[in-house]
Image (tube, helix red, strand yellow):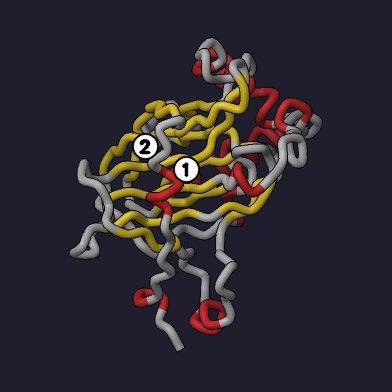
Amino acid sequence: MKDLNEYELHYDLDAEFSSSELVEIHVGDLNLPTGKIIAADPFFTDSQPAFARSVEPDKYPVYIYMAEIDELHHRVAYAKVKFRPETPTKYILALTEDLTAEELDELGDDEFFGFPVDSGLAALLDAETNQQLTMRMNLLQENKPESNYYDEVLAKEFEEYSGKNKFSRSLGDWNDHHPSTDSDNNVIMFSSGWGDGYYPAYWGLNDNGDTIELVIDFLINDFEEGEDDEFEDEEV
């Protein structure tokens, strides 16, 4: 059986990711006080384990890569956290710390482990920040049971942060959210390709096995427009 720390599922991400048609946008710097990263739907981060591989605690730039659907319509094809300026020489599947060797052995050639999205949004955050986000969401729910975090907190942030960008929809396609005003911890959020789905993340490594970047693939070429395009009407 494979050991989690030795399991490497290689992926030719570079062939797809290097497209000159993608527009790179720096959407914020992610604070990672523990270096343990969670990629998840921002409304279900409490149930998504962190990745088994961690990075040096620090702040790191986050980029999204927009694909042009038509002249006035763009979608997030990839999201990336950059840890080093160099270019990776290989990509491996990012695995969460809850996976077992038995589960890894059962993974098929065309299968992957990833994270689910049910709100049309994805997020990157530190494990410590996750505690703050969960606490704030729970507090809002206790004080206003009929409300939801998107309408009460995030909608205005998204619109102000990115709604006027020419590559974003008017409601905003990305946001830098701080669940606590007493902390630098933040959650970088962005729309997830065509919307809801199950998405993989990959570590980009150099020849020495050092971590260069983390990339989320929203598989926009695997779906037709409209299949999961429910972000505007999603209740979260």
Q: Please report the residue visible at 20 percent of the width from the left and 45 percent of the height from the top.
A: 86
Q: Secondary structure at mark 1?
A: strand
Q: Please report the residue visible at 46 percent of the width from the left and 89 percent of the height from the top.
A: 1
Q: Name the one closer to the observer, 161 or 226.
A: 226
Going from N to C along the chain, the mark reached first, 1 or 2, is 2
Q: Name the one closer to the observer, 16 or 65.
A: 16
Quadrant in which the C terminus is drawn: top right
Residue 38 disc label: none
In which image quadrant can residue 208 be found? Answer: bottom left
Check disc 1: other Cα within 10 Å, few if <14, some if 14-19, many if 20+.
many
Q: Name the one closer to the observer, 137 or 83.
A: 83
Outermost residue toward the bottom in this view: 1
**Disc 2 designates what residue?**
30
Residue 75 left/right relative to 161:
right
**Disc 1 designates what residue?**
124
Tell me how many marks there are.
2
Q: Please report the residue visible at 64 percent of the width from the left and 49 percent of the height from the top.
A: 222
Compared with residue 228, is residue 148 higher up or lower down, i.e. above or below? Answer: above
Compared with residue 11, is residue 232 higher up or lower down, i.e. above or below? Answer: above
Q: Secondary structure at mark 2?
A: strand
Circle 2: residue type = Leu
Residue 174 left/right relative to 57:
right
Is there a contact, CB below 8 Å, between mark 1 and mark 2? yes
Check disc 2: other Cα within 10 Å, few if <14, some if 14-19, many if 20+.
many
Across and down, in percent, residue 67 comes to: 53, 31
Circle 1: residue type = Leu
Res 128 seen here: no
